[in-house]
Image (tube, grey):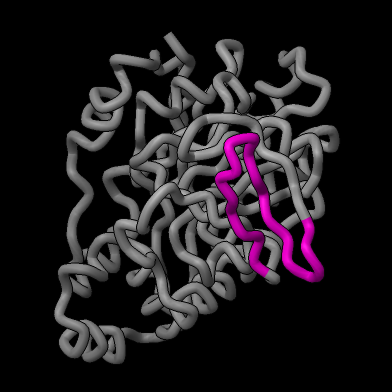
C-alpha cells in the first residue's frame, strides 16, 4: 500500500498506527497490538472491527453501475467535485493531500478528483466487496478499504484534506474527527427535480423538499455549510440504463420489481432524464 496513505490509517480496534506485513503471498496490515487485517488479492483491505451491518451491492449491481458511470452520464457531478476539490487542496499545507470518499462504491468519483489533483492520494471506503474490488484499481494513487462509515473510521485525526460524500450516509462526528481543520466535506445530494421524468413515469420516491435542510441539520453540530451550488444535465438513456439508474437510488428498496420492470419496458427510447444535484461545501466548526 502507498505509504502516503498507510501512515494515515489507524487500527479500527485500538486506534494504533498500521504497518504492512507479508507472509508468503499473504499481505495484511497489523498494529503494534497485533490486530491484523487482511489485504485481499484484489487489493482492498478489510478494516472492519466487527461484522459489516450489511453486504452492500451485489456483483451484478456493481457491474451495471460501473458501466453506467463509465458511459459518462454523471460526468457533470464528477467535474463539479473535481473542480471544488482542486480549490480546497490548493489551500492545503499538506504535501500529499488525502481525499477520502465515504461510501465510495467503485471509486469512480474519487478517481475523477484524483485526476484533477496530481499531488493527492485517495482512499475509498465502502461495505460492498464487489465495489471495493473495482475501487482498489480505480486510480494509481488510490487505496480501498472495507469499512462501516457509521462506526469509527480507520483514519487518524485530521488525516483528510477533502472528504467526499456522494449520495451516501453521513457520519458528522467521524467526518469532523478525520478532516483537517483547513479541509472541507463535499456532500452531493439530489435536487428537487432530480430524475423528475422517471419519478412520474415509474412512480418512484420523490426527493424530500426539505432535503437540504435535513442534510445541514445532520451536520450542523460539527460543520458549517460554506457554499452550495446546483449542477444539471440532460440525459438520454436506454431502458437498461434507466433500470440501473433506478437501482442506484432509494426507490430500489421500495418499488415492486416486477411492476417496475413493466413500467420501464413501456418507456420510449431514448428516455429523457434530468440530472439535478446539489453540491454543498461544509467546513469544520
Image coordinates for residue 198, horizontal then vertical, percent: 28, 68
- Asked if 277 appears above or below 186 in the picture, the reply is below
Image coordinates for residue 17, horizontal then vertical, percent: 64, 31
| 101 relative to 266 in the view: left or right | right
- Asked if 232 appears above or below 217 in the picture, the reply is below
Is 39 contained in the magenta span? yes
| 152 relative to 263 in the view: left or right | right
State the residue in front, 82 or 198.
82
- Asked if 120 appears above or below 107 in the picture, the reply is above
Kindly indicate the quadrant of the structure image that contains residue 8.
top right
Residue at 71 percent of width and 23 percent of height: 89
Q: Which residues are magenta?
A: 22-40
Residue at 16 percent of width and 86 percent of height: 259
Using the rendered image of the protein, determine whether residue 75 is visible from the camera's viewpoint: no
- Give the mark count: 0
Kindly indicate the quadrant of the structure image that contains residue 183.
top right
Q: Dividing the image into 4 quarters, which one contains the C terminus?
A: top left
State the residue in front, 6 or 88.
6
Is 131 contained in the magenta span? no
| 106 relative to 241 in the view: left or right | right
Residue at 81 percent of width and 39 percent of height: 3
Using the rendered image of the protein, determine whether residue 194 is visible from the camera's viewpoint: yes
- Asked if 248 appears above or below 160 in the picture, the reply is below
Image coordinates for residue 13, horizontal then vertical, percent: 46, 39
Kindly indicate the quadrant of the structure image that contains residue 187.
top left
Image coordinates for residue 157, horizontal then vertical, percent: 55, 21
Amino acid at each position: 500500500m502507498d505509504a502516503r496513505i498507510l501512515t494515515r490509517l489507524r487500527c479500527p480496534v485500538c486506534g494504533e498506527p498500521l504497518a504492512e506485513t507479508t507472509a508468503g503471498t499473504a499481505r495484511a496490515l497489523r498494529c503494534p497490538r497485533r490486530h491484523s487485517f487482511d489485504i485481499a488479492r484484489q487489493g482492498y483491505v478489510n478494516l472492519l472491527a466487527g461484522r459489516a451491518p450489511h453486504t452492500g451491492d451485489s456483483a451484478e449491481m456493481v457491474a451495471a453501475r460501473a458501466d453506467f458511470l463509465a458511459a459518462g452520464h454523471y460526468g457533470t457531478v464528477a467535474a463539479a467535485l473535481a473542480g471544488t476539490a482542486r480549490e480546497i487542496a490548493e489551500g492545503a499545507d499538506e504535501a500529499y493531500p488525502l481525499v477520502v470518499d465515504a461510501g465510495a462504491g467503485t471509486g469512480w468519483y474519487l478517481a475523477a478528483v484524483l485526476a484533477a489533483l496530481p499531488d493527492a492520494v485517495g482512499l475509498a471506503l465502502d461495505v460492498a466487496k464487489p465495489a471495493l474490488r473495482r475501487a482498489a484499481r480505480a486510480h494509481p494513487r488510490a487505496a480501498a478499504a472495507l469499512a462501516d462509515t457509521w462506526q469509527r473510521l480507520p483514519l487518524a485525526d485530521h488525516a483528510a484534506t477533502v472528504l467526499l460524500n456522494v449520495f451516501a450516509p453521513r457520519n458528522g462526528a467521524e467526518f469532523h474527527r478525520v478532516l483537517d481543520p483547513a479541509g472541507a466535506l463535499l456532500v452531493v445530494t439530489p435536487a428537487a427535480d432530480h430524475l423528475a421524468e422517471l419519478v412520474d413515469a415509474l412512480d418512484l420516491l420523490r426527493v424530500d423538499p426539505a432535503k437540504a435542510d435535513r442534510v445541514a441539520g445532520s451536520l450542523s453540530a460539527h460543520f458549517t455549510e460554506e457554499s452550495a451550488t446546483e449542477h444539471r444535465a440532460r440525459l438520454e438513456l436506454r431502458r437498461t440504463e434507466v433500470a440501473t439508474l433506478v437501482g442506484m437510488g432509494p426507490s430500489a428498496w421500495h418499488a415492486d420489481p416486477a411492476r417496475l420492470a413493466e413500467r420501464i419496458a413501456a418507456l420510449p427510447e431514448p428516455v429523457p432524464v434530468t440530472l439535478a444535484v446539489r453540491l454543498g461545501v461544509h467546513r469544520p466548526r
